[in-house]
Each structure stands twice: as C-alpha cells, then as structure tokens.
Amino acid sequence: SAVISQKPSRDICQRGTSLTIQCQVDSQVTMMFWYRQQPGQSLTLIATANQGSEATYESGFVIDKFPISRPNLTFSTLTVSNMSPEDSSIYLCSVGPARHEQYFGPGTRLTVT
Amino acid sequence: RKEVEQDPGPFNVPEGATVAFNCTYSNSASQSFFWYRQDCRKEPKLLMSVYSSGNEDGRFTAQLNRASQYISLLIRDSKLSDSATYLCVVNVPNTGNQFYFGTGTSLTVIP
C-alpha cells in the first residue's frame, strides 16, 4: 500500500480566508481523491484529482470553492476557499486503483471560526 | 435513498463476544465491497475486502449477498482493541468508479 502524508495536520482559520491542503504519496498513482468528513458523519467525495487535467467534482462541490491541483502523479492540493464555519471538517486525500481498495492520508482537521 | 446504509449502533459488547454488523447497498451495479475500520480521530484503514464467496481473516469474516444487496462483518472473540467505527464501503463502476461510504457502526468492547 502507498504511504500518504498530508499537510497541515490541523488548522484553525478565520472565516473568509482560504487554506491549501497538500497531499504527497510515496509512489506514482493514477487515481487520487479528496474527501470530506464532517463531525459525526461518514466520508463524502469532493472530487477526483486528475493529473494533467481539471478535477472532476461531485454534485454539491464546485471548483471555485474547492480548487484542486494535480501537477504530477505523486502530489495534489485542495484549497478550501472563502471559508465559513460550515467548512469545519476533516479533509482526507486517498489513492487507489479503480474498483480496488483505497488508502487514506492521515487527514487535515480544519476548524473555521 | 442512501447508497449505503448501516446501523450506527453503538454496539457495546463484552470481551470475547461475537458481534455482527450488516450493511445494505442500493445500487445493483455495485462491484466491489469493503469493510474499513476508523479509530477515533484517525483516517479509515482497510480491514478487508468482501468477496462473493465470503472470506475470513483470523477472527473476522465478511459475507456478501448480492441477491439481497447486503454485506456483513462478523467479529469473533472480541478484543478491547477492536473498539472502533466500522465503515461499509461500496464501489460502483458506472458512477465513475466512485466509492460510497456508510455512516459507520460504532463498536465498544468492554473489559
């Protein structure tokens, strides 16, 4: 399985600001995903980060709010823009081949005040 | 209707007990099935994949019933270290290979 790191591990941000979360994988992977896990809830897919093209967003998530970069096969960033308290959540990146298990980074715990 | 539904619990069981979790999925095109374990304030980690023939890994047994569209996880001889939230996960290829997560079932094993 891949080893995945995320930065920052946690942050407290003021509303209206933006935070960029980094995800680094120790090997080249084709599929990379970003999830959100709100308090007491399960995981919701935000988008699939595609290398060399725009991310594919799920219903309810838009590029202006959650811009994603994927400059190569080992790295991706997710930005949470113009934050509000409703964005307080854990953000997780994951990797995995299609139809097979996924492996998750340790997550970024975001609190918006 | 949710893609994946689980009983949230909590399940509180004594050490050594056997406990079973069930999960139902709504999309008959679902292809791959998994159980993940998530400890408090940690990321989900794969516990086991679920195969049509059923599979066992030590004290853990997973079953898949495609006709009824449910998945089960059986834990025998529960240990204190089994306390966690167990997530049922389903992959649906015709939705862009998206993985759908259940809300999780909370298990606490009591000494």
Image (cartoon, rainbow, N blue to C red):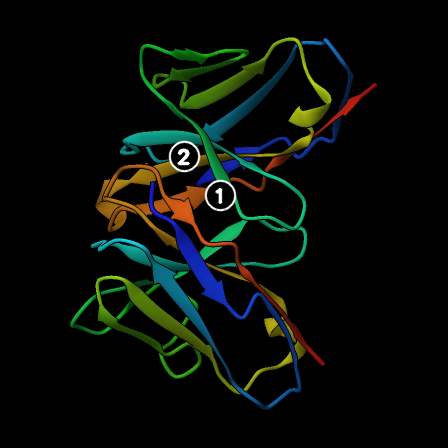
The chain to which mark 2 is attached is: B
Location of residue B86 in the rendering, given as x and y in whole percent from the top left corner: 58, 32
Label 2, secondary structure: give it.
Answer: loop
The tag earlier along the polypeptide, 1 or 2, is 1
Residue A50 spot, x, y in % from top left: 22, 65
Q: Quadrant of the C terminus of chain A?
A: bottom right
Q: Residue furthest front?
A: A26
Which of the two residues, A28 or A76, is positioned nearer the viewer here?
A28
Q: Which amino acid, by three-letter code, is at mark 1?
A: Lys
Circle 1 crowding by C-alpha within 10 Å: few under 14, some 14–19, many from 20:
few
Q: Quadrant of the N terminus of chain A?
A: top left
- The residue indicated by pointer 2 is B26
Q: As drawn, is A57 to the left or to the right of A6?
A: left
Amino acid type indicated by mark 2: Ser
Is B61 located above or below residue A113 in the figure? above
The residue at 27%/33% (across/down) is B29
Mark 1 and mark 2 residues within 8 Å of each other at the beta carbon: yes
* Label 1 – label 2 distance at C-alpha: 7 Å
Front-lying residue, B84 or A29: A29
The structure residue drawn at horizontal position 26% and vertical position 53%, both measured from the top left corner, is A27
> The disc numbered 1 marks a residue on which chain?
B
Closest to the observer, B70 or A11: A11
Q: Residues within 10 Å of mark 2 (few under 14, many from 20)?
A: some
Which residue corresponds to mark 1? B2
Count of labels shown? 2
